[in-house]
Structure formats: C-alpha cells, structure tokens
Image (tube, coloured by chain):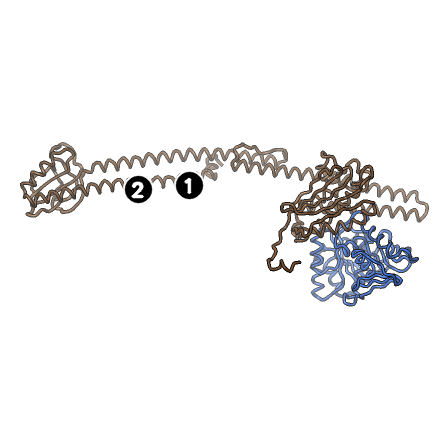
Chain colours: A blue, B brown
Amino acid sequence: MRILIIEDDKEAATYLVKAFRETGHLADHAADGLDGYAMAEAGDYDVLVVDRMLPKLDGLSLIRALREQKVETPVLILSALGQVDDRVKGLRAGGDDYLPKPYAFSELLARVEVLSRRRASTPSSEPTVYRIADLELDRLSHRVTRSGQEIVLQPREFRLLEYLMKNANQVVTRTMLLEHVWDYHFDPQTNVIDVHVSRLRSKIDKGFDKPLIHTIRGAGYMVRVGSAEEGEE
Amino acid sequence: MTAFGKLFRTTAFKLSFAYLVVFTLFAFATLGYVAWSAQKLLTDQFVSAIETEINSLAGIYRNGGLRRLVNAVERRSRTPGASLYLVTTGLGERVVGNVGALPPGVIDRVGQFETLYNRTDETDARPSVALVRVYQLPGDFRLLVGRDIEERIRLRDVIHRAFGYSLLFIGVLGCLGSWFIARRVLKRVDDMTDITRDIMAGDLDGRLKIAGTGDELDRLAQNLNDMLDRIGELMRGMREVSDNIAHDLKTPLTRLRNKADEALRTAKSPDELKAALEATIEESDNLIRIFNALLMIARLEAGNAREGLADFDAAEAVRDVAELYDALAEEAGVSLDVSVENDLPIHGNRELLGQAMANLLDNALKYGAAPDGSNPTITVSAKRIDGEVQIVVADRGPGIPEAERHHVLERFVRLESARSRPGFGLGLSLAAAVARLHEGRLILEDNAPGLRVVLVLPLKEMPVPQAALPSAA
C-alpha cells in the first residue's frame, strides 16, 4: 500500500519511511503542511500519517482542507499531545485514527494496515457473516460456529472475536482491541487483554488442530489460517 | 514620592476624606434644620401673641374708646416681661406706650415687620430688634404691638457658634482618623510589598505577617501565604519529579544500553542477537509507558483536561472496567466481588475514570494477595452517599501502613515490599490526579486486613422529566 508521511521531524520521518518500506509498503514523505496537502491531494495514497504540529499548515487544518476537497483518504494522526480531548479534536477534524507519541512502530503499522483495509470496504459492504476457515460468526444472530458446532460466547467475547475476524489476516494490537471492544483508550499496563484473548482462544481453538487466533510477538494478535510463524515480522 | 504624597494616594485616605465631606454636609443639614424650626416656632409664638393682644386691645378700643385703651396699655406695659405697645395719632404723635424711639416712618406702615426700637424706660441702651405689628384703629389712631426678638437672635448666634465648633471638631477628628487609618494600613501594605519583593527575589520561605485581627489585610496575607505554600509545594513536586524522572528513567535507560552493549560484545548467533534486541524493545516500551503516565499526570494537574468533561454513568464505567479485569483476576485465582448501584451520573471524563479504576484494580491484583494465600478476594463497589459517588476497591493484602498512605500517592513512590514487583509507582498518583480533576478525592483506608481505596466523585443529578418517568421502566 502507498503511505504518505507528513512529519516535520526529519529523523522520525526517515525512520518511518524506512520502516514502512521494510514491511513491504511504499512510503513518501512531506516535511511541512503545505507540501503534505499538495501531495495528498494529487497522489493516490491509501493512508496518510499526519503529525499534528507541522510548519506552514497544522495537521488538523490540513485534514479539514482535504476533507473539504472530498479527499477521503484515511488519516492517522500522530500527536505529542496524548490527552483524551486531543484525540476527540483530531477525530472531529476528520482524522480516522489517533496515535499519541511516543508509539511503537508495530502499533502504527497495525493501525495503518487496518485503515487501508477500511478504505476498500465501506460499512454497507461489510458482510453480515465473517468466515475464516471453518469458523463462522454471524453478526446478526450473534451465533458463532466452528465446523458446524455452535460455540457459546459471552457478549464481550463475541465483540472481541468480531473485531479480530473483521480484521482477519491483519495484526490487531492490544490497545486497538481495548479501543474497539471496550471503548477505552488507555494503556492497560498488565496483560488484561491477553487473558481475554486466551479465554476466547480456549473456546475457539481448543479441540481443533488448526489454531486460528495467533499471537504476533511484539505486536498483538491475528486471526488467520496458517501458522503464527509467518505472521512474525 | 514623599510620605505625604503616598498618604494622599491611599485608598484609606480617600475614603476618610469622602466620609469627612459627607458627615460635614450631614451636620450642616441637621443643625440647619434645628435652627430653622426653632426660629419658626418662636416667630409663630410671637405672631400669635401679638395677634391676640391686638385683637383684645382693638376690642377694648371699640367698646370703651381711647380712654380705656390708654388705661389698658398703661396697665399692660407695667407688667414684667411686657410686650411693646405704642398708640399714636394718625400723624404719628405718641399717645401712650412703652416704646420710645422708633426709626422714622415705622408707625406709618400698617402690617407686620421687624424693626429697631428703644424702650421708654431704658434710654441709654442701644436699639433692640422687635417684631411688631401696626394696626389701624378706627378714628385714625394707630396701635403698635410688638415682641422683642433679641432672644431669637441670641438663639441664632448660639446655633451659628455650634455650627462652627462642630465643623472644626468633625474636621480635626476626620483628619486625625484618616491619617491614623491610612498610616496603619499603608504601613502594613508597605510591609507586605517589601516581603513579597523579597520572595520574588528568591526567598521562597518568606511569609507575610498575620496581625491576628482577622481583617481584610489579614485575610489577604493569609491567602498570599497559602498561595506561596501551594507554589512551594508545586516547586518541590517539580523538583522531586525531575529528580525521580532522572533516576527512574536513568535506570531502564542504562539497562537498555547495557543489554545492547552486551549483545554486541558477546552474542554469537543471530538468535541471541534477536533475543537481545527484543529485550531492548521491551525495555523501551516500558520507558514509553512511564512517559505516557507522567505526561497524563502532568496534564491532569495542569488542569487543562477540564474542557473535555461530559456527563456519563459512572456505574457503567466501573462495571466495564471490573469486567475487563475479571478475566485477569480469575486467572490469578482471585475472586472479584462486584456490586455496583445502578445509575450514578457524574460529570467527568469516562476515559480517565476508566484509567483510574484500571490502575486501582491493577494494584489490587498485584499487591492484594493475602500473605498466607487465603481468601483472595477483591471487592469493587460503587454507590451514592450524600450526593457523592463512592467507588471502592478493597483487597485483602498486607495493606499500606497509615504513615505511608499519604506518601504513596506521590509520583514514583513505591513501598519497599513492592520493589520486587513490576511497576513504576505512578498508578495511585494518576488515580489521585483523576480524582482531583473531578473535584473528588482519593482516600486510602485500612480494610482490616488489606487496603481499601475509596474514590469519591461528586454526583451529578440530572433533571428527570416527570413525563418520562412512567415510560422509563
């Protein structure tokens, strides 16, 4: 996928460009808000990574200007201001996700990948049933089956699996799970999410030879067919 | 600027001066009214006495002629304290009476007026003033009846003198008073200015003197002192934090550096190098966490998170976080006992409350195990008490000694017994900062045994529309 990084800190930008390229993506860099705006408007990018504080045109104004021009490329906002209302302001300006600095690259990568996928599928085209191998999740009837056997899940476990399956074959980080399943944006510090995932895993994967929920070390989780080894970066 | 110039510019002086002017005007008005009404009373009495006498003498004249009138006037003139009488012919020639010299033309003016006169029996004296009335009798005689009004004039003089003295008295007293007040106030304000200048110059331990009178200046001084205490506290906090940051970040940073260094020197295989790199990433993630927590506390304490507040149900938030930690507790063999009342509306930040709750539960799980391993229960409750929401997280662990309870709310403070466990000593500080942001408080209590953390937040009563009640069920 093509990523445009709009970031005035040269070193951070170089690092991001390099890291994205190493993970198999195309990455361009703009060093100020005006350049970034021009490139984002002209180029066909899948995701924009925008720093909030930029010379010439600040990040939020840039996003508003793009949305004004009907450029609907998903935007991830990077910000040194990590407070909750900053996130709200960022999302209100038209951003799609928000990551406070400092962040781990694995977190950024996972979020960017999810954003680029979201671009391909609009909410209306979301299937009502998710399927991975023999695992099936029906979003309307709230039923989960594997190889035809019904699996009884708690409501929260259902939402967890739903989010994982919606983003199948993509890394989902712990904070992303906390955000989308519990609607909290803080850092839970201990392995609270891990415990929930392992509970879910014991219901989904236990008794089947092919595990579907994989742990990606240093990053998060992924639902996919195949071994966990391939998912490791 | 001279001392006098300063005095004139003080508020106290200006106020005293204004009072002085007002009191003077008031005194003038009061005395003036008293004088005027006293004069009027006297004059009215004179007028009616003269009227009565003229009527009675005119009656005598009408009934008994001039002869009887002369007799009556002579008789009346002799009585002590008599009025003034004069009967003249139409040409002004004196017939009878006790009035001697009169200014010329007086007797020709019929009516009531004031005039100078002399009595017949005191020729030497200077003329006095009298209120007289001249009455035209039939047969071209004139009757003058009057009253000496020297008395009234003396009264006026007395009042005038009183005016003067009281003015002088008020003036002197007012000047003295304002000078005294201005000097006293000015001196204290000058002292305050001096001390604050010293404090600004760097003597942060200096405090303003409290006179103990409990007046405005005392209250001001007290507030300034409280403010200085608060500033000092913040400065100490800042210093402590920067020291702690230096220390707490230095430790993991050194460890990070050493690990990388060691890997570089000793690692033989790519696998070993990879493991070392993973360890360094883990260390840096920890650093990021510490930074994030510190930043959040700093923001909360700076108070600019207040704008992001909204109304939400604390009960739901507490239940959500408890549910989030329930799996972890079960894993650790701890039973999480949750009892949350329904409907606890508060005004605040749901995210931050969630974070605070997560920290408290995190702590309870980490440190809340009973020393002997028995009955590992964590109780979470939320209920309304006296217009407040009381959220309690209680464990059965070793608790925190009373002397340490205040201390552990500070940043980076960890009990000796907790040193061996993972953690940064920021969880409770953050929870306390969240409580303060919500204008609530975080209290640590003895759960006998164990620790009982009480998070008290002000309840936000939402108006319930009456019509909505029946359908609410």
Left or right of residue B60: residue A228: right
Circle 2 residue: B33
| Vertical side of B373 occupied by A135: above or below | below
Q: Position of residue B288 (x, y in %)?
A: 78, 47
Q: Quadrant of residue B261?
A: top right
Q: Going by the picture, which residue comes out furthest to the right? A: B268
Is B47 on the left-hand or right-hand side of B26?
A: left
Question: Which quadrant of the figure contains the N terminus of chain A?
Answer: bottom right
Residue B131: x percent and y percent? 18, 41
Q: Residue at x 89, y 62 (%)?
A: A147
Front one among A116 and B269? A116
Q: Quadrant of residue B17?
A: top left
Q: Residue at x 71, y 52 (%)?
A: B316
Query: Do tags 2 and 1 sit on the same chain?
Result: yes
Residue underneath mark 1: B18
**Secondary structure beneath label 2:** helix
Mark 2 or mark 1, which has the lower sequence index?
A: 1
Picture coordinates of residue B184, whole percent (x, y): 49, 33
Determine if residue A133 is in view.
no
**Mark 2 vs 1: CB contact within 8 A:** no
> Which amino acid type is shown beneath numbered disc 2?
Tyr
On residue A213, the disc is none
Please state which of residues B420 and B237 is positioned toward the viewer in this rendering: B420
Label 1 marks a residue whose chain is B
Residues at marks 2 and 1, CA–CA distance in whole angstroms: 23 Å
Element under disc 1: helix
- What amino acid is found at the position of numbered circle 1 in the picture? Ala
Identify the chain of the residue marked 2, using the numbered disc in the image.
B
> Of tags 2 and 1, which is closer to the observer?
2
